[in-house]
Image (tube, coloured by chain):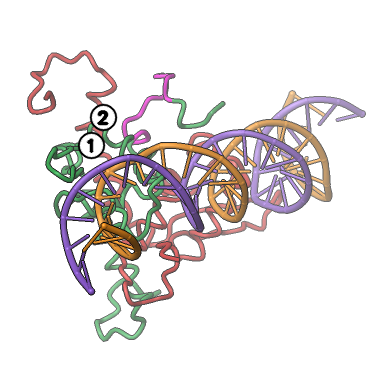
Chain colours: A red, B green, C purple, D orange
Amino acid sequence: MEDPNDMDTERDYCPVHEAIQVLQEKWTMHIVRALLDGPLGFNELGRAVGGCNPATLKVRLDHLEDLGLLRRTVHSQMPPRTSYELAPAGVDLQRVIDAIDAWAREHLDVVAEADVDEEPSAAAV
Amino acid sequence: MEDPNDMDTERDYCPVHEAIQVLQEKWTMHIVRALLDGPLGFNELGRAVGGCNPATLKVRLDHLEDLGLLRRTVHSQMPPRTSYELAPAGVDLQRVIDAIDAWAREHLDVVAEADVDEEPSAAAV
DNA sequence: TAAAGCGCTATACTATGTCAAGTGCTTCCC
DNA sequence: GGGAAGCACTTGACATAGTATAGCGCTTTA
């Protein structure tokens, strides 16, 4: 009823909310990140994101294509190759990925190392 | 096998990848966004994010607390109130939310309004 | 001729998230 | 003073989202 996916009620329409809905789908941000480095084929992309299975991958790619975030091109050579690349709206997500990148380096590196000699700052208590 | 959730192999450990894993969980970004405006109680928060059910909400909040992104405080008054607020690491996600916000306004407003009088800039194709 | 890679698709399964209800508490209101 | 309502959850049945595994028709490579 109050599921944020139901955005046909424009009463509380909010572009940020909708953007989050898209970006939080599993693999979506990984896909965008991978494609920021250049176009990839279907299987290549699956491997680049870290092992997404083809069924899910196809669903995501179709969705992103519908939203205009990426473009699917079939090169009619032999053998036919498909390539996926970000459309301009998708490329602009670089800012978002960069922000996540910056945040992650600042806050997750610590977790990863766990034996850092920094003072506990305000984290304790 | 190659599930990106299995990050115990530090072979391909990547903080960005891990950050995405956290942020892509359903409701997480909505929760962070809601809490950026200040602390909220449990039910308040559920409503603020747009109707997340209590079961999922609790799981998310516990996870975010474990990660050190938010703090749960029980005020031992009568009746006892719980409040959730972002820890410093969580507050720093403001940058990420802002980036999403900017992207959304640029690329999703168009979809929503469809009859804006702004010049199309680079959005149209 | 066999093996492997491409871009998928199909089926069956599991994990994730949801609904609806209920808990024990307290305050509000008639 | 009895009932409804709000708090912060918890529980259990269920639906949906995502996964593993296999396979399709195709082509190139060994």
- Is the residue B44 above or below the residue B73 in the image? below
Task: Residue at 19%, 32% (x, y): give it.
Answer: A106
Contact between marks 2 and 1 (CB within 8 A): the answer is no
**Magenta-drawn segment:** B7-18
Q: Is residue B94 visible?
A: no
Task: Give residue A108's mark.
Answer: 2
Circle 2 residues within 10 Å: few <14, some 14–19, many ≥20? many
Residue named by callout 1:
B69
Residue B87 drawn at (x, y percent): 16, 38
Task: Residue at 30%, 78% (x, y): give it.
Answer: B120
Q: In the image, is B26 to the left or to the right of B86?
A: right
Give how far apart the Cα atoms at labels 2 and 1 are: 11 Å
Foreground mark, 2 or 1?
1
Question: Which chain letter matches label 1?
Answer: B
Circle 1 residues within 10 Å: few <14, some 14–19, many ≥20? many
Task: Give residue A100's mark.
Answer: none
Residue type at numbered disc 2: Leu
In reply to whether residue B110 is colored magenta, the answer given is no
- Is the residue B45 above or below the residue A37 in the image? below
Nearer to me, A7 or B18: A7
Question: From the image, which quarter does the C terminus of chain B lie in?
Answer: bottom left
- Name the element at disc 2: helix
Q: Quadrant of residue A116?
A: top left
Nearer to me, D24 or D28: D24
Residue type at numbered disc 1: Leu
Residue A122 drawn at (x, y percent): 8, 28
Residue B109 drawn at (x, y percent): 31, 73
